Image (cartoon, rainbow, N blue to C red):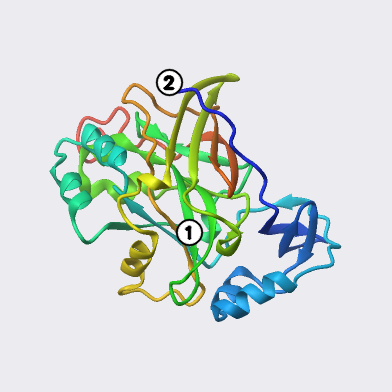
Amino acid sequence: MTTTHNTSVRPEVALARVEANGRTQWAVRRGDEYSPLGMTLSELLRLPPADARRTVEEATGGGLRPATVLSPVDPGQEVWAAGVTYLRSRDGRIEESTDGTPYDRVYEAERPELFFKSTGARVIGPGGQVGVRADSAWNVPEPELGIVLDSGGGLFGYVPGNDVSSRSIEGENLLYLPQAKVYTAACALGPEVVPAWLARAPFAISLEVRRDGELRFGGTASTEQLARRLDDLANWLYSCLDFPDGVIMLTGTGIVPEADFTLLAGDEVAVDIAGVGRLENGVDLVGRDILAGADRKGGQDE
């Protein structure tokens, strides 16, 4: 277990989706002051980059008093993810798998591993509960830098993310990747989106998992360790997909817990990205184990 330190300094300016004045709306936060953005993130990401920046910079005056900070994504937007972008991630995937060859090959390949992660409506926000599958014995958080891309594939901003995953399900068979990655409460983002022109890469990333108040696992990484450029990942994602409302893309993890660690219901997880924000979530058990007690593939006894 690695000791971690809280590297968070709250960004001076960020975009937040909030409940305020009885409705959900987007705001620009400057310090402790929230100003209405006047549009959704989807609408903002449809604008030319210069207009989007001007819209953010001209949102001033304050006046909002948020009751709740929500996940920083519109319900109709999508979250995608890249895998095996760090050497540690490749090694971790090889450790969990019955055949590690594909992970070795994709780490070296020109084409990256890209996969769908979540709809915006399913994303868990700051303070919410992420999920671990009831039918998985080995579950891990994956702290990741999320990039917010506009409708043309340009980089608009950054957001902390947690790509919660079942290592036992994916390790059993590569064809089970969607089940290992896409399920109820498997994706968390937040607390805010930091505009790219106000953030400076590379970013230090840290993970803390606490159990009964004690640090159970901690680790650190840096986006300097990424084996792929962020613009290259964006280019591949947009090469044969259109995102008229923009998209959030998780860029992979460089922090992989050891094989003797699994995330449990009741744990508390913190993903900290220096200069971008700190995402904190509890953990719940989700779903049901339909194979429990079954002795054949049909899942029921005769």
Residue neighbourhood size for the residue with mark 2, other residues' Cα within 10 Å, grouped as few (<14), some (14–19), many (≥20): few
What kind of residue is marked 1?
Answer: Ile
Q: Residue at x 62, y 45 (%)?
A: 126
Label 2 SS: loop
Asked if residue 38 can be seen in this view, the reply is: yes
Q: Position of residue 62 (x, y in %)?
A: 83, 63
Q: Which quarter of the rendering shows the N terminus?
A: top left
**Is 298 positioned to the left or the right of 130 in the image?**
left
Q: Which quarter of the rendering shows the C terminus?
A: top left
Which picture quadrant has residue 289?
A: top left
Circle 2 is placed at which residue position? 1
Q: Residue at x 48, y 40 (%)?
A: 205
Whether 49 is drawn above or below 137: the answer is below
Which picture quadrant has residue 8?
A: top right
Circle 1 is placed at which residue position? 147
- Mark 2 and mark 1: Cα distance apart in space: 28 Å
Q: Nearer the viewer, residue 251 or 81?
A: 251
Q: Residue at x 38, y 24 (%)?
A: 261
- How many discs appear? 2
Label 1 SS: strand
